[in-house]
Image (cartoon, rainbow, N blue to C red):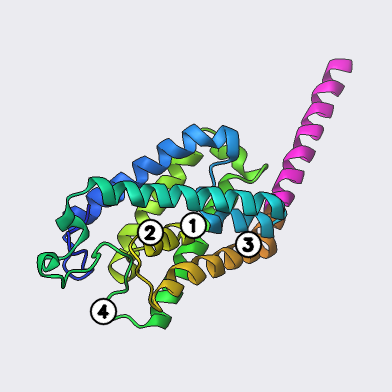
Amino acid sequence: MLDRSLNPEQARPDQMISTSLAICSALIIAIYLCGPTSGSHINPAMTVCKLLTGSTNLVKVLLYSVAQFIGALCATGTLCALCPSDWILGQGHLDGTGHPNWLLELNPKSTFTQGLFVEILATMLLGLVFLLVTDPIAGKQFAGVAPIIVGLVVSGLFLSISPLTKCCMNPAIALAQAMIMSHYDISLLVYTLGPFLGAVAAALVYSTLLVHGIRQKDEYEDLRLVLNYRKADSKYDG
């Protein structure tokens, strides 16, 4: 876990690395366990990516989002119940001046617009990777290792941008923490609106730039197989 104050400017590199490894490991395990059953979206933003690229329907998006939010509530509630109070409250918690210090918050030197852009960018990158590894054609080459790829990408993004926004990328987590800890301010929009806008951007880039190349490559491979088959068949007939 990061430094108890979780001040982005005070977090030590070793704490950031250990946290990123914990996130990576948890994601890999969750995806391997749940992937065969549900696709293991985990994140409402990733489910929106699937919706916008035509891979799922609105009913599933709503059901998945509710399940993801319930999971985030359970996880946040469990942490609040089990973790020592000084991990949850600041040093001044005994005299009533403490606040939930592991809530998502922007770097004090970052503006709202900067934080929003960072969350959009990070979620877009994650969304593109998610769409590629789950693509019925491109995903074939990642069969068996897709969970590891997603876990490593999230870990890398966390190390890159957590000093700025703590790298949420998941609206369910942001809303769950806000509800459990009764903490609402304008920065909450960074962690809810940002990921959804990032999902829209990922779906747009994937649909306009990537999917056509993937389909053309698949058609080329099919043609090559047909030609090789005909060549082998003609030799056999000869």
Quick check: marks 2 and 1 in contact, CB under 8 Å? yes
Secondary structure at badge 2 equals: helix
Q: How far apart are marks 3 and 4 (CA)?
A: 31 Å
Residue 234 lies in the magenta stretch: yes
| Residue in front for this viewpoint, 144 or 219 | 144
Q: Which of label 2 and label 4 is nearer to you?
A: 4
- Residue found at x 62% / y 65%: 205
Circle 1 residue:
126
Neighbor class of circle 3 (other Cα within 10 Å; few <14, some 14-19, many 20+) is many
Residue 155 lies in the magenta stretch: no
- Residue found at x 70% / y 52%: 59
- Type of amino acid at the residue the image marks with label 3: Ala
Secondary structure at badge 3 equals: helix
Q: In this view, does 179 lie to the left or right of 11?
A: right
Classify residue 237 by image quadrant.
Answer: top right
| Residue in front for this viewpoint, 36 or 238 | 36
- Type of amino acid at the residue the image marks with label 4: Pro
